[in-house]
């Protein structure tokens, strides 16, 4: 006994689908003829053989592979998405590692009072900014120019 659900597109007999050529990136409209080749009674899964061609009588099967229709394409794209996500995560880890190394190097060269804990990123950037402004003022003073920056006491300044 065979039943076809309308919500399961991989079980339909003939179907026009848009197929993208992975090598060229071009889309080709082809007719996909899905024929039932085996059935698993316990799980209710239907196996189908894909044949691509202009008509259902075409004998050109793709390497004789047995697939589950569109599920295989979804599985490949899911695998591809997973691979891309893993690669993206690795790039982000490397980027953050590089950024943290740069902050550590900046902490080493910025003059500050040594504390039990390391300076936070915002503290490091604020100290670096203030240090650059102070050095700019020193250079301007040595040249006999007016100071570019004025400093105000900040009651919230902890460092």
Image (tube, helix red, strand yellow):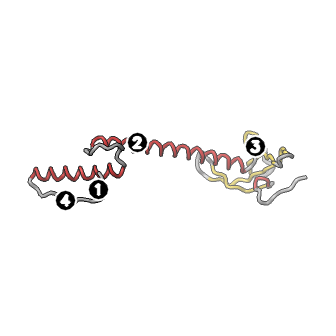
Task: Look at the numbered disc 4 and give the secondary structure of its residue.
Answer: loop
Task: Look at the numbered disc 2 and give the secondary structure of its residue.
Answer: helix
Q: Position of residue 116 (x, y in %)?
A: 34, 42
Q: Which tag is nearer the camera, tag 2 or tag 4?
A: 4
In this orientation, which residue lies closer to the viewer: 61 or 74? 74
Badge number at residue 157: 1
Please tell me which of labels 1 and 2 falls first in the chain.
Answer: 2
Task: Look at the numbered disc 3 and give the secondary structure of its residue.
Answer: strand
Q: Position of residue 85 (x, y in %)?
A: 56, 47
Would you call the spot at circle 4 few (<14 residues within 10 Å), some (14-19), or many (20 or more)?
Answer: few
Would you call the spot at circle 1 few (<14 residues within 10 Å), some (14-19), or many (20 or more)?
Answer: few
Which residue is the site of mark 2? Answer: 98
Query: Which residue in the rendered view is the most extreme toward the left?
Result: 144
Please tell me which of labels 3 and 2 falls first in the chain.
Answer: 3
| Structural distance between the alpha carbons of marks 3 and 2 | 50 Å
Please tell me which of labels 4 and 1 falls first in the chain.
Answer: 4
Q: Which tag is nearer the camera, tag 4 or tag 1?
A: 1
Q: Which tag is nearer the camera, tag 4 or tag 3?
A: 4
Please tell me which of labels 3 and 1 falls first in the chain.
Answer: 3
């Amino acid at each position: 006994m065979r039943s076809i659900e309308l919500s399961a597109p991989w079980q339909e007999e003939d179907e026009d689908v848009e197929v993208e050529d992975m090598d060229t990136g071009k889309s080709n409209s082809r007719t996909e003829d899905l024929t039932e080749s085996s059935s698993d009674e316990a799980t209710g899964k239907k196996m189908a053989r894909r044949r691509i061609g202009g008509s259902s009588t075409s004998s050109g099967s793709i390497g004789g592979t047995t697939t589950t229709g569109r599920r295989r394409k979804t599985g490949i794209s899911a695998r591809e998405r997973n691979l891309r996500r893993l690669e993206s995560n690795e790039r982000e880890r490397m980027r953050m590692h590089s950024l943290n190394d740069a902050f550590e190097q900046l902490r080493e060269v910025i003059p500050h009072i040594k504390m039990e804990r390391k300076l936070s990123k915002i503290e490091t950037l604020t100290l670096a900014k203030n240090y650059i402004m102070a050095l700019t003022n020193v250079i301007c003073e040595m040249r006999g120019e007016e100071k570019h920056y004025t400093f105000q006491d900040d009651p919230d300044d902890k460092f």
